[in-house]
Amino acid sequence: MALCEAILCALLAVVVGGLYLAGAFRKRRANEPPLAKGSIPWLGCALDFRRDGVDFLRRMQKQHGDIFTVLLGGDYFTFLMDPLSFGTVVKEARAKLDFNEYAHELVNKVFGYEPSQTTHKIVESASTKHLKGSGLVVMTQAMMDGLRTVMFHSLGSAEGGKRWRQDGLFHYCYNAVFRAGYLALYGNKSHESATDSQEAKKDDFQHSEEVYNEFRKYDQLFPRLATSTLSFGKRKEAEHLKRLFWDLLSVKNVYQKDNISRWVSDQEQQLAEEGMPEYMRDRFMFLLLWAAQGNTGPASFWLLLHLMKNPEAMEDVGKEVDRVVKESGQEVKPGREVINITKEMLTDTPVLDSAVEETLRLAAAPLLIRAVVDDMKLKMNDGREYALRKGDRIGIFPYLAAHMDPEIHPQPHVFKYDRFLNQNGTKKEFYKNGEKVKYFTMPWGAGTSMCPGRFFAVNEMKLFAFLMLTYFEVELVNKDEEVPPLDKTRYGFGVMQPAYDVQFRYRLRC
Ligand code: HEM
């Protein structure tokens, strides 16, 4: 009898302890944001959130206002939905709100990479050197060369290029931009002579296609991998693909190539100098590929699709592109070398810049997360103060809180290519409650974790748009095709993908 009681007590203690750890007894304290724990211990509201994050947060906002805390899979997340208050989080010192903790957890889970203390600093300094200023001139040229290889190689003769070809628009754009970016970052097949050079180009063409195909398989598993919701079979597939990329992009393999970018090689060498083992640097190479190439292709798709759906936008951007090409003294002629578009040429395109910004407003939906290092107070823009608990997380989801706010961006679901331009060509300002909004869009994140590749990313998209508009006639197979809805499973992971692809036709203009 005594034994039974002891076992029962122990079981009870385990259950109560488990419920305590699962947050079942957490109560909202004075000055804390409203709390939503959901109905399932530990999971809290995770299922609702994963099903459709935007719908869930919108409901929470309606119920609780512009700050609230929710339980998601064992962690408490405080969501801040007031864009006028974003600055308090984005600019808060790392000693209070830490970006690394959550990011480290994620990259470890998804890429098997264990970041060193200095990884973030190494990424920042290499990006400042190689993805801005004169480094960006070199990278833009490398991207241009990559696009030449992947977009024109398969067309064969000028005559062959003139017949209509059909493809999925998402597939076409992602494929071209990914492969060109991959070649620009990770180098080309090495060759010794001019004849070798043609063979090497052919090799780059084929090899980059194979890499893209494998990458897409991983990319499709990514959201469920990050949220630990893959089935056993899919987990095995993801594990296989991860190992394939660790090998394909291993330090040994990458250094067999010519023209590997300094952005990649400098980071790898600095990690080696600080003593990181080679197998871990192989994994870092894969992480870099995903960070660099997982967003720009989908963003290029949305840009081209919106231009195709908006003839006025297409015409205005087309005129701007033609003017820039003309002013560079180059001409597009049948049988001639593809023109060279430089970083310099891409600096004089206000209309295209606005169209790119509008595209990212509609399609970029990152979730910015910081860990609360110690109990602290968060002061909102209107003066209200909230207490945040050590160990919780704070989340900003600008897609809903800023990009889709009709007060900041009237008719937020409509693509307005010149939304970011004033009549006189200067940049527009945006307001909410009569106050100027600094963070009116945040496709690149902000503060310490802001995307270090943003200037290169924009140039990748613009180069692709320049080449498509100058060299190709494009049309949707079904002219009445609607813009497809977003694939809701990808909220929080950067640029969204469409729920399905749309068919288009393309052929060389001349
Ligand atoms: C449209 C394209 C892109 C978008 C929308 C985008 C967006 C973002 C965002 C939102 C983050 C921060 C995530 C966070 O706060 O947790 C980020 C991080 C990062 N991005 Fe991008 N990105 C793009 C393209 C690129 C490109 C082309 C590169 C490099 C060539 C790049 C390199 C990186 C890296 C290395 C990080 C992690 C930085 C760190 O250690 O903190 N991204 N990106």
Image (cartoon, grey):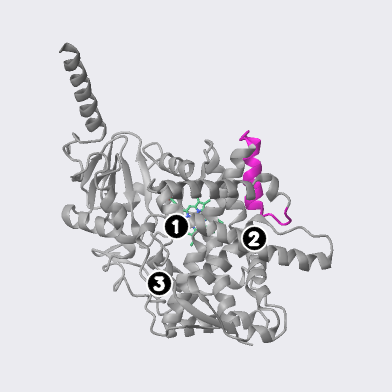
Disc 1 and disc 2 in contact, CB within 8 angstroms = no
Residue 353: x and y in percent read 48, 71
User: Which marked residue is nearer to the observer: mark 1 or mark 2?
Assistant: 2
Residue 184: x and y in percent read 64, 60
What residue span does the magenta drawing correspond to?
A: 257-277
User: Which marked residue is nearer to the observer: mark 3 or mark 2?
Assistant: 2
Give the alpha-carbon distance from disc 1 to disc 2, as whole Å. Answer: 21 Å
Can you tell which quarter of the image residue 420 is in? bottom left
Whether the residue carrying mark 2 lies under 8 Å from ligand 1 is answered with: no
Give whichever of discs 1 and 3 has the lower sequence position.
3
User: What residue did someone put label 2 on?
Assistant: 184
Q: Of helix, strand and loop, which one carries label 2? A: helix
Q: Of helix, strand and loop, which one carries label 1? A: loop
Q: Of helix, strand and loop, which one carries label 3? A: loop
Can you tell which quarter of the image residue 8 is in? top left
Taking the magenta stretch, the answer to whether it contains residue 261 is yes
Question: Badge 2: how crowded within 10 Å, few (<14), some, or many (20+)?
Answer: many
Give the alpha-carbon distance from disc 1 to disc 3, as whole Å. Answer: 17 Å
Point 58% across, 71% down: residue: 463
Q: Amino acid at mark 1?
A: Trp
Q: Amino acid at mark 3?
A: Phe
Give whichever of discs 3 and 2 has the lower sequence position.
2
Residue 482: x and y in percent read 37, 78
Vertical comparison of 425 with 112: above or below = below
Asked whether residue 139 appears in the rendered view, the answer is no
| Viewer-side residue, 150 vs 65 | 150
Q: Amino acid at mark 2?
A: Ala
Taking the magenta stretch, the answer to whether it contains residue 287 is no
User: What residue did someone put label 1 on?
Assistant: 444
User: What residue did someone put label 3 on?
Assistant: 420
Asked whether residue 105 appears in the rendered view, the answer is yes
Vertical comparison of 13 with 86: above or below = above
